[in-house]
Image: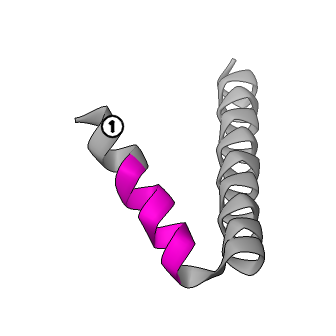
Amino acid sequence: MAQVASGFGGVWRWVAAVAALVLTAAAIGLWARHGAAVFFDMLATGIAYCF
């Protein structure tokens, strides 16, 4: 049983790592396409919209 539980936890760890990698790639892509000023403006607008 312990091996199954640790294997299942390992899957979630991989899912979280892939999600973080995708978000990082998206941020780098936005930065490369729109430049730093527009990127930070969109980021600040998104955060402000949440609150």
Closer-to-camera residue (11/6): 11
Q: What residue is at 46 percent from the left and 70 percent from the top? A: 40
> Which corner quadrant of the image does residue 23 belong to?
bottom right
- Colouring method of the image: one colour
Q: Which residues are magenta?
A: 37-45
Is 43 within the magenta? yes
Q: Main secondary structure of the magenta part?
A: helix
Quick one: quadrant of the C terminus? top left
Quadrant containing the N terminus is: top right
Question: Residue 19: where, in percent of width, then height?
Answer: 70, 46
Residue at horizontal 50 percent and vertical 79 percent from the top: 37
Q: Within the image, what quadrant is residue 41 found in?
A: bottom left
7 relative position to 5: left or right = right
* Residue nearest the viewer, comparing 50 with 38: 38
Amino acid type, mark 1: Tyr
Residue at the disc numbered 1 = 49
> At 76% across and 50% down in the image, what residue appears?
18
Q: Indicate whether 16 appears above or below 11.
A: below
Give coordinates of residue 20: x percent, y percent: 65, 54
